[in-house]
Image (tube, grey):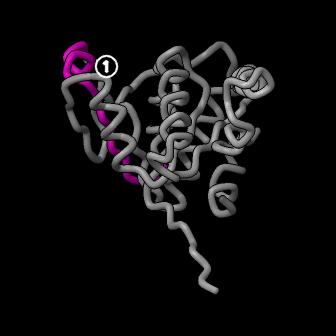
Amino acid sequence: MLLKIMIIDSLCVFCGASPGNKVIYRDAATSFGTELGRYGIRLIYGGGKSGLMGCVADGVLKAGGEVTGIIPNYLNNRELGHTRLTNLEIVNGMHERKQRMFDLADGIVALPGGVGTLEEVLEIITWKQLGMHNKPIILLNSSGYWDHLNDLILNSIAHGFAAPITKDLYEMVANPSEIIPTLRTI
């Protein structure tokens, strides 16, 4: 019997360009970035310098890791791009950004964020549901942030709008230190 082990060299991280209103969100993003840097896992993210995006990127960089940012031209022109990244790719729009981030990564992690982050998470879960990929998806559930999304997905299953397997397309963890060990078990 062959044992297939998934190697994670890079992770796509979706998260807010805002810091949120709880220190735990910023601390978790920075801590997770530090973990990525320590483990030598390249961060693929939206290229921003503010909010949780900036926290996770700064954590990776401070730990000596590599960071690739993917940012649409119009956001970079507004000086929202992080200037100290290992690599910053400028793309034409949000759809191209998300696709490029996905293509470069071996797995996906979502930290708290706004409607843009919600859209990214739901699309990546949908792609997995449709069989378009089998990359691991982990939601960092800091302070219960993703509980309501999980409840919504369970509600859609209960009402017959989603298959029961939908709840198995992603994992939720409470602490940044659980992400990499969880990736090793998926």
Q: Secondary structure at mark 1?
A: loop
- Spot the residue most to the front: 160
Q: Position of residue 123 (x, y in %)?
A: 49, 30
Q: Which residues are magenta?
A: 61-78
Q: Is residue 135 visible?
A: yes
Residue at x 68% of width, y 22% of height: 23
Which of the two residues, 106 or 163, is positioned nearer the viewer here?
163
All told, the count of numbered labels is: 1
- Spot the residue most to the right: 158
Quarter of the figure that contains the C terminus: bottom right
Residue at x 45% of width, y 29% of height: 54
Q: Is residue 37 left or right of residue 182?
A: left
Q: Residues within 10 Å of mark 1 (few under 14, many from 20)?
A: some
Q: Is residue 143 visible?
A: no
Task: Specify the quadrant of the image occupied by residue 180.
Answer: bottom right
Q: Position of residue 122 (x, y in %)?
A: 54, 28
Which of the two residues, 46 or 154, is positioned nearer the viewer here?
154
Task: Specify the quadrant of the image occupied by residue 165.
Answer: top right
Type of amino acid under label 1? Leu
Q: Position of residue 138 (x, y in %)?
A: 62, 43
Q: Is residue 79 left or right of residue 21?
A: left
Quarter of the figure that contains the N terminus: bottom right
- Depicted 157 relative to depicted 17: above or below: below
Residue 123: say if magenta: no
Residue at x 66% of width, y 37% of height: 140
Which of the two residues, 72 or 134, is positioned nearer the viewer here?
134
Residue at x 57% of width, y 35% of height: 110
- Spot the residue most to the bottom: 1
Q: Which residue is mark 1?
A: 80
- Depicted 17 relative to depicted 109: above or below: above
Q: Position of residue 96 (x, y in %)?
A: 27, 31
Residue 77: say if magenta: yes
